[in-house]
Amino acid sequence: MLRIVTNNLAATHKLGEAIGKNLKGDETLALVAPLGGGKTSFTQELAKGLGIKKLVISPTFVLERTYKGRHPLHHFDMYRIEVEDADSTGLSDILGEAVVVVEWAEKLKSVLPEDTIWATIKIVGENTREFIFEYPESRSYVFQNVK
Ligand SMILES: Nc1ncnc2c1ncn2[C@@H]1O[C@H](COP(=O)(O)OP(=O)(O)OP(=O)(O)O)[C@@H](O)[C@H]1O
Ligand SMILES: [Mg+2]
C-alpha cells in the first residue's frame, strides 16, 4: 500500500508521469474516485510517461480510447456502464496485453486481473487529493521513484 497526497493538479500530473514511466506494458490500473476526483488528470500524465504525445481526453461517451506510445494504452471509463455489460466492452480481450486504465473500476471488480493496481482517490479539499495505491508485490516496480 502506498499513500500519496497531492496538493495541486501539477502534483497529480507529476505522480501520473512518474508511474507511466515505470510501466512495462501489461499493467491494469483501476481508478476509484468520485466525480472530479482526478482520474482523467492522473491518466493524462501517465500517458505522457508512456511516451504518448496525443492529449488523453475523457472517454466517458465513447467508453474506450486507445493511444500509441512506448506501450499501447487503453483508457476506459465505466461511468455509464452497467456491470452486466462489462464483457461487451472489449475489456477482457486486452487485459494483460496492454496498459489498461479503467475509471470507475469498482463497477467491474470481478473481471479485472488479480494483479490489478488499485488507486483510490479521495477529495480532501478543493486542490488536495489523497491517492491510496494497493497492489501485489509483483507490481511494486511501478512505484519505484514515485513519491
Ligand atoms: N490535486 C489535484 N489533483 C487532481 N485534480 C485536481 C487537484 N486539485 C484540483 N483538481 C481539479 O479537479 C478536477 C479533476 O478532474 P478530472 O476530470 O481529472 O477528474 P475525474 O475523476 O476524471 O472526473 P470524472 O468522474 O468526471 O471522470 C480538475 O478540474 C482539476 O483541475
Ligand atoms: Mg474522468
Image: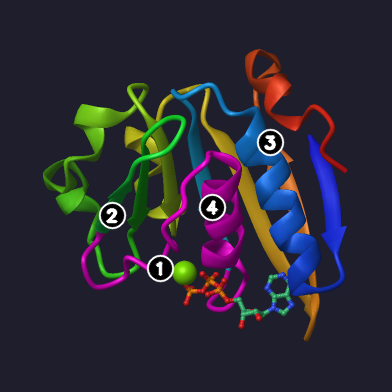
Q: What residue type is labelled 4?
A: Leu
Please report the residue visible at 53 percent of the width from the left and 59 percent of the height from the top: 44
Q: Is mark 1 within 8 Å of ligand 2?
A: no
**Residue under label 4:** 31
Neighbours of disc 3 within 10 Å: few (<14), some (14-19), many (20+): some
Whole-percent x and y of residue 11?
80, 63
Answer with left or right where residue 27 lies relative to residue 142: left
Residue visible at 32% across and 34% down?
111
Q: Judge whether residue 48 is colored magenta.
A: yes
* Amino acid residing under circle 3: Glu
Q: Is mark 2 within 8 Å of ligand 2?
A: no
Q: Which of marks 3 and 1 is in front?
A: 1
Q: Distance between the residues labelled 2 and 1?
A: 9 Å
Regarding mark 2 in the picture, which secondary structure is present there?
strand
Q: Which of marks 2 and 3 is in front?
A: 2
Residue 143 shown left or right of residue 139 in the figure: right
Query: Which of 61/118 is in front?
Result: 61
- Among the two numbered marks 4 and 3 on one chain, the one whose residue lies closer to the N terminus: 4
Residue bearing mark 2? 65
Marking on residue 134: 3
Disc 1 on helix, strand or loop?
loop
N-terminal of the pair, mark 4 or mark 1, is: 4
User: Residue at the bottom extreme?
Assistant: 126
Question: In the orientation shown, which residue stands out farthest toward the front?
Answer: 53
Of tags 2 and 4, the one toward the viewer is 2
Q: Determine the CA span between mark 4 and mark 1.
A: 15 Å
Quarter of the rendered structure image containing ligand 1: bottom right
Is 66 within the magenta? no
The image quadrant of residue 104 is bottom left
Q: Is residue 101 above or below residue 25?
A: below
Q: Quadrant of the C terminus?
A: top right
Magenta segment boundaries in residue numbering: 34-63
